[in-house]
Amino acid sequence: MLCAAGLFCTVAQAAIVFDFSWTGNPAQDPNLTSSGDTTASVSGFIELDVGPGDSFDKNDVLSASFTLSSSLFEDVVFGHTNISFLTGTVAADGLSAGLTDFYLGDGSPPSFGCVSLAGDCARTALDRHISSYTTAPDTDVSFLYTTTEAARASFHLTAADPVPVSLPGTAALALASLAAMTVVRRRRPSAGG
């Protein structure tokens, strides 16, 4: 809490850390109608400099780490500098967020996210373009969903920690008044001096 001269207090916006998950397994996502790799998954976290109800893009990312896993290749780790496209909105309660656009990588293997490199999640398919870096050639694998909304909803972002809630204005005013009265009382001269 930031207080100016004990008269008014505001709560500084805190960053929100979201746990991130995605699966290419139709048994775990009923909106997935076709999967090029049922063992594929992505897990990790993303820290955003936003508050509840805010929209965000890749410029709001403070840190991130995503691990793309499959039985077909070694794990691939992406950091926040690998985010090419990212837009979304934090829920009003700050406990989750929805993505409207998401792409990791630069279009060359390995990469993961929406089909279009122009950052277009408006299509009903997601694309994961990977390379095993060993003997297998580059593989382009698609994941098809029932609707565009289902494709976007396949990215799960859940707040890792509770979101700080600001004090109501009246509580902040009451605390500021109490602090001011304490300062005034301490400055009052004593009866004997």
Image: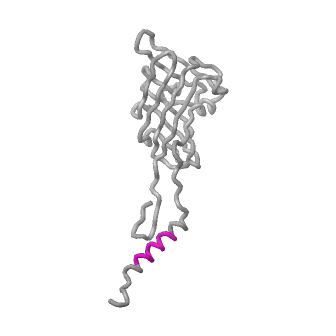
- Asked if residue 60 is positioned above or below residue 183 in the image, the reply reads above
Colouring of the image: one colour
The prevailing secondary structure element of the residues shown in magenta is helix
- Asked if residue 16 is positioned above or below residue 126 in the image, the reply reads below
Q: Residue at x 56, y 29 (%)?
A: 22
In this view, the residue in front, 48 or 159, is: 159
Relative image position of residue 52 (x, y in whole percent): 54, 49
In this view, the residue in front, 141 or 163, is: 163
| Residue extending farthest front | 192
Q: Quadrant of residue 124?
A: top right
State yes or no: residue 132 in magenta: no
Q: Residue at x 46, y 53 (%)?
A: 13
State yes or no: residue 175 in magenta: yes
In this view, the residue in front, 34 or 25, is: 25
**Magenta residues, as a range?**
173-183
Q: Residue at x 53, y 23 (%)?
A: 127
Relative image position of residue 172 (x, y in whole percent): 50, 66
In this view, the residue in front, 128 or 40, is: 40
Q: Residue at x 44, y 15 (%)?
A: 132
